[in-house]
Amino acid sequence: MVRLARVGDRSVAVLAGTAGDRALDLGPRPLPELFAELDGIRDLVERTDADALPPLDTAVLRAPVVPRAMLCLGYNYRGHVPDGVDPTADDPVTPDVFVKTPNTLGGPNDPVVVPTVADDVDYEGEIAVVIGRRAHGVALDDALSHVAGYTLLNDVSDRSWQRRQSQWALGKCFDGFAPLGPWLVTADEIDPQDLLVEVVRDGEVTVSQSTATTIFSVAFVVHYLSQVLTLEPGDVISTGTPQKLSAAQDAHRPLAPGDAVTVRVRGIGELTTTFIAPPGEPE
Amino acid sequence: MVRLARVGDRSVAVLAGTAGDRALDLGPRPLPELFAELDGIRDLVERTDADALPPLDTAVLRAPVVPRAMLCLGYNYRGHVPDGVDPTADDPVTPDVFVKTPNTLGGPNDPVVVPTVADDVDYEGEIAVVIGRRAHGVALDDALSHVAGYTLLNDVSDRSWQRRQSQWALGKCFDGFAPLGPWLVTADEIDPQDLLVEVVRDGEVTVSQSTATTIFSVAFVVHYLSQVLTLEPGDVISTGTPQKLSAAQDAHRPLAPGDAVTVRVRGIGELTTTFIAPPGEPE
């Protein structure tokens, strides 16, 4: 398992040193161009003395990939029912999929602006699949071989805009509403159906649910989406959000400037997003 | 008014010669990089003897722009009611917006593959707005000044995939399902609320309706969407499709390999798309 990140204009492997994370420079090429060379990178990481490397400068981490397409699942964890769906109904037989546009992409340390026109901003902590190898019409059994690895996405949404019409796009596509990172963890040691997704809002755990409770496995989702789109290296499929814990549902209020939300998954990492007022406006 | 196109890796102005269209080379920069120089291009076009130019090689026309975001309206012409919407209801108060992903983009002469897994493929002939100048939170009165021009889009859709879930993305996002072109017509002589949109399928006119019947003007749509996304030069907003004429509705059958659909709008141009079987499969 290797952690791969973008630091400024460089790709790096992130190694655990005795006093924190270290950065092994892999050159300027974006991560998707390195996905075919992962075996060599793994060997290099194993041969490298982490403590001889410079510290990872987390302040300049950028989104690990710049996806051509960012596809998101609307209803995947049992118990999480989107607006307008009958909660007593059977599991859906196919995923409900929407798109986040490129203007939404943010780095793992980029704050998210709470837009003046948005009054019901919410978070969704999600595991994001990063495509490693072109996928078109791939069989279920072969689907995971097209996955380079996993990272975290906060699918920030404004519920008010989301609910105005049948399609959710505008609630999902405000600038910066898709912070991604902090890095990509290669798929080799991860069982994507056995990960605990947790979200911490302002110090309280508000989500805690295992991917074992998803309706659609990562393999199925890659297989299914590849019937429609040719998925390219670096494309992202976000696997949906668990329902908030019931106390968190009761206490929920829209995100406001000053709030912070952390998405964390053991084996992948933590993605903390702070919410801020638009530039020039008071908090 | 100037027609701007991409021919291979060049930008060109398209001039009407006495024996057909001619191409005035504008260099390799993509069209959005030229949008700030339109006055100079107009002057150049006026000074140029079209008949001294080489003929436009329509065979190698590409999509005039490669949008970062391609946003589409679901319900804009009075009389066209999408699935699930009550046709007797009042006009919607806000546009219903969805996204087409970058894999859908096609050039004006690219055939569209009817996917093996799609059995209810349909066309939607639309006027596409091309953003000329960055737009974020623009006022209604100022919105049209952010438009570089207009082109045509066939919003190809598979109704069966579109209807599987609440979100239409998968029905809209098959590879090549957004042929765009043939060129961009600059906005200066176009009244976007007075254009007749026609579609011809296999020789029959199936759509004929004016943009005067739209619920949301181009100015409103640019204003409204810019509240959410920062629109960048080259981004595309497709303005929705009129309903098919009633005889065409009655005669409608899904598109199949061998079919051809032309979207035409006087003052903009014609976009003809042929539908073909997947490579290696018989028609």
Image (cartoon, coloured by chain):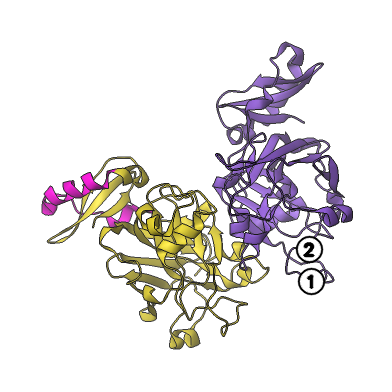
Chain colours: A purple, B yellow
**Type of the residue with mark 2:** Val
Marks 1/2 in contact by CB < 8 Å: the verdict is yes
Mark 1 lies on a secondary structure that is loop
Q: Which mark is residue B159?
A: none
Would you say residue B53 sits in the magenta stretch? yes
Q: Quadrant of the N terminus of chain B?
A: bottom left
Q: Residue furthest right?
A: A247
Chain letter for the residue marked with disc 2 in the picture: A
- Looking at the picture, how far across and down is residue A60, in whole percent? 62, 27
Q: Is residue B156 left or right of residue B4?
A: right
Q: Is residue A195 left or right of residue A127?
A: right
Locate residue B84: give its quadrant.
bottom right
Mark 1: give few (<14), some (14-19) or many (20+) Cα within 10 Å. few
Which mark is first along the chain, 2 or 1? Answer: 2
Q: Which mark is residue A81?
A: 2
When the figure is inspected, residue A150 is found, relative to residue B240, above or below; the finding is above
Would you say residue B76 sits in the magenta stretch? no
Give me the residue at 38% from left, 73% from top.
Answer: B211
- The residue nearer to you, when weighing B228 against B242, is B228
Mark 2: give few (<14), some (14-19) or many (20+) Cα within 10 Å. some
Give me the residue at 32% from left, 72% from top.
Answer: B194
Give me the residue at 63% from left, 47% from top.
Answer: A114
Distance CA(mark 1)–CA(mark 2): 8 Å
What span is in magenta? B37-64
- Which residue is labeled 1 in the image? A86
Q: Main secondary structure of the magenta part?
A: helix
**Type of the residue with mark 1:** Asp
